Image: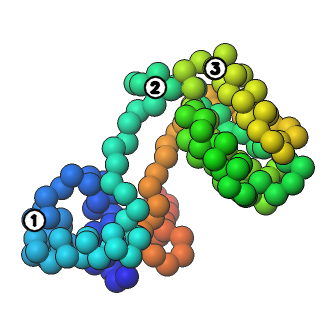
Amino acid sequence: MDDIDRMLLGELQQDATQAYAALGKAVGLSAGAAHERVRKLREQGAIRRTTVDVDPAAVGRGVMAFVLVEAGSWMGDSPTKAALEALPEVVEAHIIAGPASLLVKVRTPTTEELQASLRRLYAIEGVTGTQTIVVLESFFERPVDVRGGGSPERPSPPEPAR
């Protein structure tokens, strides 16, 4: 993956509906060359899917919570994955190291529905407990930084006034 591929990915993260001509122009390629590179990025798995970023509150899923799921055994097996995938309110699930076995992101319409979701999570075989953090407000969510390298460049602090 070179810098042009990274620029294409960045452009697509901003607007995946762009025409290949616009993508090519943004990164200095022809429409055909941009199309070919995007096709290869899909084949390589760098682009997993093209989707729409829906505002959860606008569709009645304004309550967001992160749930630490404690378990008595390894939770990375297929039955656990299938049980989590069967819960539509679970929008992310991650095997983690730390105080719990899984970190699950849940979106529901109300706190009452969140409570019902926690009951369903607790009913999954192997789950021994949960700890829930309810999000009051999100400052921002950002896509993956595709520029590569270490941490993103930070602007230099302003010069002190004299």
In the picture of the structure, the residue carrying the numbered disc 1 is 21
Query: What's the residue type where badge 3 is placed?
Result: Glu
Percent x, y for residue 144?
46, 61
Label 2 and label 3: CA atoms lie apart by: 14 Å
Residue 48, numbered label: none
**Element at label 1:** helix
Above-or-below relation of 156 to 125: below
Comparing 140 with 21, the one in front is 21
Q: Report whether 118 appears left or right of 9.
A: right
- Depicted 40 relative to depicted 136: above or below: below
The residue at which mark 2 appears reads as 57
Mark found first going from the N terminus, 1 or 3:
1
On screen, residue 157 versus residue 22, left or right, reads: right
Residue at 14% across, 64% down: 20
- At label 3, counting other C-alpha atoms closer than 10 Å, the crowd grade (few under 14, some 14-19, many 20 or more) is some
Where, by quadrant of the figure, is residue 118 drawn?
top right
User: Sequence-wise, which precedes: disc 2 or disc 3?
Assistant: 2
Per the model, the C-alpha gap separating discs 1 and 3 is: 46 Å
Q: Quadrant of the N terminus?
A: bottom left
Looking at the rendered structure, the secondary structure element under dot 3 is helix
Q: Which residue is depicted at the point 41% across and 71% down?
A: 45
Residue to which mark 3 is pinned: 113
Of 74 and 55, nearer the camera is: 74
Q: Which residue is found at the position 76% from the left and 39% from the top? A: 124
Callout 1 touching callout 2 (CB < 8 Å): no
